[in-house]
Image (tube, coloured by chain):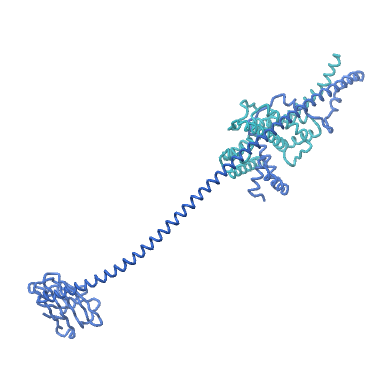
Amino acid sequence: MIDDRQQELAALYALDLLEGAEATAFTAELRRSAELETLVRELRESSAAYSLTAPQVSPSSELKMRIISRLSDKPAAAVPAAEPAQVLFFRPAVIIPWAIAAGLAMGCFWLVSSFVRTRADHAVLQQQLTLAEVESSSARNQLEAERILSNRQLADATTQVGQLNQQVAQSTEKISEATRVLGETVQQLDRSKSELTTRHTELAQINEKLAAATTLVGELETRLRSEGDLAQFKIATLASMAGNSPQALAVAVWNPKTQQGILRVEKLPALASDKDYQLWLIDPAYPAPVDGGVFTVDPATGHAQVNFKPNQKVNNAAKFAVSLERKGGVPKAEGPILLLGD
Amino acid sequence: MSFVFTHLSSVLTFPMVFGERYELREYSRMTTAGSSEPPGDRQNRDGELIRLMAEGDRRACADLYDRFSRPLYSVALRILNDQSEAEDIVQDVFLALWEKAGSFDVARGSAFGWAITLTRNRAIDRLRTRRRRSTLLSESFVEDLPGGSSTVDPDSADDLIFKEKTIEVRAALATLPAEQVRALELAFFSGLTQQEIAARLSEPLGTVKARIRRGLLKLRDTLTRRHD
């Protein structure tokens, strides 16, 4: 099986484009493979056919005679010579002068052709000698040109090596500089980390101080509230109505100034999932109780503490009530009142 | 004396006339068959002529000259672009065929292939010698290949043998991509090395080799199919 590489070498070989070791190796390969040899033969024939693409021009008419006249004699020549003799018919009396004339002619012809051939051979040899001298001279000149070229290439290579050495030295300097800068950067980083730790410590101390100040402010607020506003607060205790939740208890603290309050309940029954407790503030100024919001209790303890703010202004919170309503509350009380107080 | 020379001239010219008659008759038989002569028969006839040349038959050489001289001369002229040098090459080739006819083996290829190879190699050798000389004299390199003689001869009856083949080859080349045709043209006619062809085409060496391979294989396949 011939592979692509062998096909390529065969094509180049058929066109006489292989040279040197490549040609030698392929010739050896060719001897071993009849298939490869066939391929080369076919490709040579194809390239011979390709030659016909050259514009077809005839040589001069003298060339044929020139070539035929220079053909050397061959000892085994088998030129049919008997045919003319059979065609010609001469009487015996005429043969003798013809034979003499032919002998003389053959002798002259032989001498002339020998002279011409020798002269031509001499000219050819002289031409070949001249050509060989020219080729020898050309080869010497080419070698000299190649030597000059090689020297130039060597000089160029030396220059390039020098330039590369300079580049290496410059690169080494740059690496040293970069290493130094890196060291300084690491030192700065260490210093920054130390400063950051110090800042963290300071921040923690500030936070502690802030917490202490906040506590102090709260205490002051409490004190102010107890001293100034406590008298205005309304505190109401809410008790169970009609035994709905006999143990339930609630306390409501109402600040009329801020319209806000706190409701704290205990022991209210646990709520069904669709129910809420709703706080109501009863102000005589309104015909219906004012909504104070909904709340739930801890199912286990019935405990809840709720900050509330009614949706209407309440000037006089006469009573507080807690009813059981639908989930989310209602605008007007619908369910049973569980707690009531004033 | 005049009688002697008169008869002498008759003796000398008669065989030549007879020989020319023979050549004309034989040549006419071959050329009138021309375009219809099957390639196999043509190659057999070429081989037979070479065999006769090996035995020293000058008429066979004359016949072979009539068959081959035009394509051989055309190739040499295409490569060298010099009529005188091309004729020298054709002369050298026929003298070489005459001397080496005994070594011809038809199993190794056709006589025409052999003759073309000899012509091309000698023409390229001479072209390279000329180039070396030109390079050393710092002459500028001819950029384009010679395009052949501007006065292309019309086809004569002598060349009908190759006319049909030429048409086949051109038709086969028309099926190849242009870059493969260009690579083959440089490979066959320019006398450049592989590397020089790659440089001339500004292509990597591997690409040029692949183009030559594909082009020549496709040419072989197409020509083979036409003869099947």
Looking at the picture, tell me which residue is in the foreground, B156 or B85: B85
Rendered position, A236 above or below A45: below
Residue A241, image quadrant: bottom left
Pick the front one: B49 or A142: A142
Tell me which residue sits at (50%, 50%) in the image.
Answer: A169
Instruction: Establish if A88 lies above or below A138.
Output: above
Is A87 on the left or on the right of A31, as rendered?
A: right
Q: Position of residue A52 (x, y in %)?
A: 65, 34
Q: Is residue A48 left or right of residue A209?
A: right
Q: Quadrant of residue A146?
A: top right
Look at the image and give the colour of chain B: cyan
Can residue B158 be seen from the camera position used here? yes
* x then y, percent, for residue A189: 38, 61
In the picture provided, is B182 more to the left or to the right than A300?
A: right
Q: What residue occupies the far left of the structure in this picture?
A: A285
The quarter in which the C terminus of chain A is drawn is bottom left
The relative height of residue A271 versus residue A29 in the rendered view (above or below) is: below
For image coordinates 83% across by 29% down, the residue present is A80
Q: Decide if residue B172 is in sight here.
A: no
- Which residue sits furthest right? A93
Give the percent coordinates (x, y) of residue A320: 13, 77
Query: What letter labels the chain drawn in blue?
Result: A
In this picture, is B28 found above or below A202?
Answer: above
Residue A112, picture quadrant: top right
Number of numbered discs visible in the structure rendering:
0
Q: Position of residue B155 (x, y in %)?
A: 65, 28
